[in-house]
Image (cartoon, coloured by chain):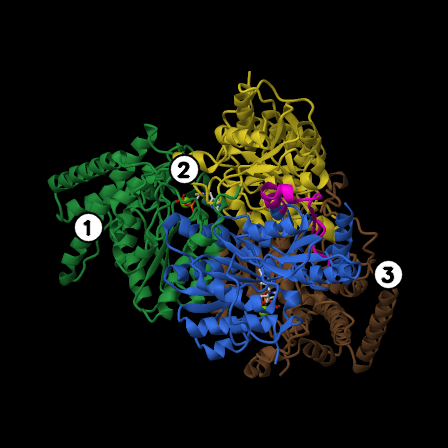
Chain colours: A brown, B green, C blue, D yellow
Amino acid sequence: MLPTVSEPPAGEVGALREAHLGAFRFMLRARLLDDKFAALYRAGKIHGGVFLGRGQEALSVAVGISLVKTDVFAPLIRDGAGRLAFGEPMLDAIRTYLGSALGSMRGRDGNVHRGRPHAGLLPMISHLGAMISVVNGMLLARQLKGISGTVGAACIGEGATSTGSFHEALNQAAVEKLPLVLVVANNQYAYSTPNARQFACADLADRAAGYGVAAHSVDGTDLTDCLATVGAAVAGARAGGGPQLVVANLLRLCGHGEHDDASYVASALKKSGLGRDCLKIAEDILLREQWADAAEIAVWRSAALREIEDHVAQVQREPAPDPFAEAWTALSSQHLSEGQVQ
Amino acid sequence: MLPTVSEPPAGEVGALREAHLGAFRFMLRARLLDDKFAALYRAGKIHGGVFLGRGQEALSVAVGISLVKTDVFAPLIRDGAGRLAFGEPMLDAIRTYLGSALGSMRGRDGNVHRGRPHAGLLPMISHLGAMISVVNGMLLARQLKGISGTVGAACIGEGATSTGSFHEALNQAAVEKLPLVLVVANNQYAYSTPNARQFACADLADRAAGYGVAAHSVDGTDLTDCLATVGAAVAGARAGGGPQLVVANLLRLCGHGEHDDASYVASALKKSGLGRDCLKIAEDILLREQWADAAEIAVWRSAALREIEDHVAQVQREPAPDPFAEAWTALSSQHLSEGQVQ
Amino acid sequence: MSITYLEAIREAQARALRDDPRVFIYGQDVGEFGGAFKATKNLAREYPGRVLDAPISEDAIVGLAVGAAIEGMRPIIEMQFADFSTVGFNQIVNQAATLFWRTQVPCPITVRLPFGGTSGSGPFHSQSLEAIYAHYPGVVVLTPATVEDAYSLLLAAVAIDDPVIFCEHKLLYYHLKAEKLPTEALPIGKARIHREGRDLTIVTYSAMVHEAAAAATELATEGWEIEVVDLRSVKPLDTDTVVASVARTGRLLCVGEAWPWGGVTAEVIARVTAEGYGLLDAPPQRLNAKDTPVPYHPNLWAAHRPTARSIAAAARNLLRT
Amino acid sequence: MSITYLEAIREAQARALRDDPRVFIYGQDVGEFGGAFKATKNLAREYPGRVLDAPISEDAIVGLAVGAAIEGMRPIIEMQFADFSTVGFNQIVNQAATLFWRTQVPCPITVRLPFGGTSGSGPFHSQSLEAIYAHYPGVVVLTPATVEDAYSLLLAAVAIDDPVIFCEHKLLYYHLKAEKLPTEALPIGKARIHREGRDLTIVTYSAMVHEAAAAATELATEGWEIEVVDLRSVKPLDTDTVVASVARTGRLLCVGEAWPWGGVTAEVIARVTAEGYGLLDAPPQRLNAKDTPVPYHPNLWAAHRPTARSIAAAARNLLRT
Ligand SMILES: Cc1ncc(C[n+]2csc(CCOP(=O)(O)OP(=O)(O)O)c2C)c(N)n1
Ligand SMILES: Cc1ncc(C[n+]2csc(CCOP(=O)(O)OP(=O)(O)O)c2C)c(N)n1
Ligand SMILES: [Mg+2]
Ligand SMILES: [Mg+2]
């Protein structure tokens, strides 16, 4: 059963088509990049874990595509698609996973822990929920500097809604009426933990009223719904509507990380609507609406594959970080560094 | 304008009368004890701060009186009345404030930081929100041990709802469906901070739905409402209804502590219904319902004053803690104590 | 048959559950899934209702454990990584660690911290926080280096009436093996001579015991006899055993995988110089991780922490002094 | 005219707000109310929109500061008490302290911690957490002992590009006075000889500088000349000045108000014995608070922390060695 795209006014059809086409291509590139990381992981070419966004690309891309360059974006572990859409160079992802000295994290941090704060792209720390208040701070700073019209988006999973950080930050944003868009991907599991052990409310969107923020629910498997709903949330924040809580329902179509076979995922869930593959659904929309045909999609796919292979090949030739060239200080004020005190 | 006691079925009038009379006497004793602490503070007889429950006695006593001996109670700084009702000896309060070596805290901790864990009365640590999950743990332990019918109540102010601990603990209780009664005294200020800088929702009771717990709102100035509403919440938890969130509206009729003149409290609030003195209202109820007359109340008052003066005089003669007799170890396993390593 | 460090931790928990009805386990993914590292594998099935999945709420996780302990239970908490204990920090250091001192009601909780660096884990899945917890009064901090100690110290941790921070090193989980579980063990608070020697004492703990032992082996080929002391417990810290070793060797090198400032190594040196000053033939030295977050890339990681090679180099320098 | 330590902190903030539009203040009750201790008195009125009351959300408070710093602001955070920073701990040590190292984007935030014991404040309003923060890479930890340093170190804290934990001692707030604010000052990272002497060096910081000085005065009547070194900054720690002092006196007593295990005193001794071993004529000693929470009752509190009297006694012992 395909989702129905509700009839938009004639003039907007072109925009809708463009948005879907753009989004789909980011999703496709993100999926293929994820596949590559999985393959590199299996081949023992990646140090540490690999965390994929499979099944969450529609939601993630909707966030990235709804933002503009000057916005702030704090993606989390399953946001490969959103990152690309926001403008993260694919090279950053590959370099960080492979630990290249030329990457934005220079081998100091890895995998999904990457970003460029001055480009508005925050590099997550692992502690769940901790990035949201950082987004708040960037938004508040802009208000203090008299910059308006900026939006900040933060993505998290439903498991992270149980953190104190989530609560404090959402409440803080509400008190300051900041243009925060907080996107919760309810993918039914936090690692192996099912929702029944994570929260007891009927719908996480019910939390919004308790903070005094706007709520949006979205079918995370449906690109059209994601684009519309996340787009509306971002527009609402940009228009001065204060924080927006978006709760998407979907299913993680992979393990928590590539080391995890996810055998604990209930088969009823896999078979339910939540278990649909958003990439497949998006492709079907394009075909049905005749926004693209199979041949075009095949071209995009092979272009993306080539792009990925080229980048990986390039990064594999790049230098690894050199411990002897490292500054080995965590301070920016070099003169205050304690250096080699052991 | 007096609150109206809605007509109860004939058989319950006696119980209602008894509840009001009992509650009023605890409130009165708590108020007079607070007055004494304030006087001792002004006389320089108390080390550190003094924190009063003035204006919050009706709510607090309703909690204490709704619990039974085998329940768990985690009061906070404004719960003198609830403590007495739950069975805390008045001596514990005085000894802790005066630092007597014979008090339950033996001079190690002071003022409102007192309790007897094995009597179900938790001694708060200062970090707001931190006691709620401890109550959860006691309730869970009882479930594990097969003990049923226990309720645990935790009191906090509206300011503490902004802590991550509050959120994590309430969610935890909801997931485990624990018989937790979480009572929020929304007294409009957290120290000097007004609600507008603390949260942005219309009503803190709106938070309940986001956790999947029951909500109760109550006029915290009205003893009758407090007894009914808190009583219903406790009964709901005891009956297996899971966590209950009670939000009371009232005003702190004193400074944050006795060092604070509270000049920041808006006079409009003081003049509003929130600013009514719950003790005065409770007295008016007793008189109007002819459950007590002025003479009886005067007798209770002087008995309470005598009790307080006697206790204070006794405690002032008690030994102060002796540093030379102190064990100076924080471990229960004495043999693992590092002793005087400096 | 052989048993790993990780299996020993699982077995200790199984035995604690079996022998003591007051024990239960609480932490993220510890139930049906058996934990991120499988330290609670099958325990939920074997002990139904006593191995509970927690929400991602470290503060409430520890708070709940304290409450349960007040009621006489003996909870074992698994932090998914030691690094995440920072968000449960307040409940550990201010709630659990102060309870007995304030109220005379003991707080027998065990907080398991899978800790320490492994290649490719990066700044937030590699931290060594033993010094952070040991600075606070009211806690015991254990750092087993061997399969035997992983087992017996964990059982001891669950048995004592105080909060225990149980630092189990992730690098040892799968690789370190023993023939069988021990039937007897040194008590908490006693250090152990891991290897005897007479030229220099290396005091260390946890995974670094093995780096130090490798360094000692290397130095043996150069004719040096290095004594390696495994602290086992960093709080309490067995100053007597350390001082006695220094009395034999005259030289002290303290090695830790944690950051330098105020680490175990500083504490050991402060104690030895106060109590065993005359015993030292050369200035005591320490070797710690570098004072930066733990890097992701293996090249950087290997340079960030002490290794057999850097320990041997430091020891050689000290032997020459 | 005279100015207190607390007023100096207020004045430093006023000047930072005046001179640098990037500065703003965020914390509970810091606005109209002027802060629990009045360290931001009138600042909200004088600098409208730049002194903001925060909800009771320490984690989000610090997180917000980091975000603002990324955007080029220089936030000053007031924790109501140092003790409550434990619930903002993770954002300090894992977010703020790692930002520059991970991304090369500096994180110029100042976290003011009103800290240290005062009579009647009890276990949760008295803590000294300088060693906890100093253990982590990526932070600077300052501990002013004088009115002048309270002022100039706070200005320096706001000026540098790294996260600063600014430990201001509550006991000094009202009682410690100076004639006027300084116009020049030692930089961050330099210790100061508070009092010269040649028989023994006491290394300390913050309120304990005054206890040590009082002990020195007492010992002077017995003919001893005690040198008191005020560290000013515990991270970085000015080992050179300390070692130079020990070179003059030959004896070292380290004094701290924090708990003993892994405190500043252990760190100082580890450094001095590594670098200045031959300079010591006697074993270095330390004197810290006792290893329990800070007690409420004045009798217990006075025995829990080092005082002029206990410092003098420890110094006498050491002088006799
Ligand atoms: C504070 C904290 N506790 C524990 C973890 C370990 N951890 C990493 S991911 C994860 C599960 C996250 O689940 P969810 O938020 O639902 O996101 P998802 O992985 O499903 O996308 C956990 C527990 C962490 N990163 N941070
Ligand atoms: C985590 C934490 N942060 C700050 C404080 C300092 N503090 C003590 S009471 C208080 C105000 C509490 O307000 P509220 O919760 O509304 O309770 P009320 O005093 O109004 O009864 C604050 C900020 C604290 N105790 N704990
Ligand atoms: Mg999830
Ligand atoms: Mg309040």
**Start and end of the magenta stretch?**
C269-295
Q: Are marks 2 and 1 in contact (CB under 8 Å)?
A: no
Which-is-in-front pick, marks 2 and 1? 2
Residue at 52% x, 22% y is D218
Determine if the C-beta at disc 2 is less than 8 A from ligand 2: no
For mark 3, does the 10 Å Cα neighbourhood hold few (<14), some (14 to 19), or many (20 or more) residues? Answer: few
Residue at 58% x, 83% y is A271
Is C263 drawn above or below residue A56 in the view shown?
A: above
Q: Are marks 2 and 3 in contact (CB under 8 Å)?
A: no
Q: Label 1 is found on which chain of the structure? A: B
Quarter of the figure with residue C74: bottom left
Residue at 60% x, 73% y is A250
Which numbered dot is residue A319? 3
Which numbered dot is residue B22? 1
- The quadrant of the picture showing ligand 2 is top left
Does C282 appear in magenta? Answer: yes
Is B22 drawn above or below residue B32 in the view shown?
A: below
Return the x and y of residue D205 as percentages of the image width and height. Answer: 59, 33
Quarter of the figure with residue D302: top left
Residue at 88% x, 65% y is A317
The residue labelled by disc 2 is D300
Return the x and y of residue B330 as percentages of the image width and height. Answer: 44, 49
SS label for mark 1: helix
Q: Which residue type does callout 3 highlight? A: Pro
Return the x and y of residue D168 as percentages of the image width and height. Answer: 56, 34
Q: Nearer the viewer, residue C271 or D305?
A: C271
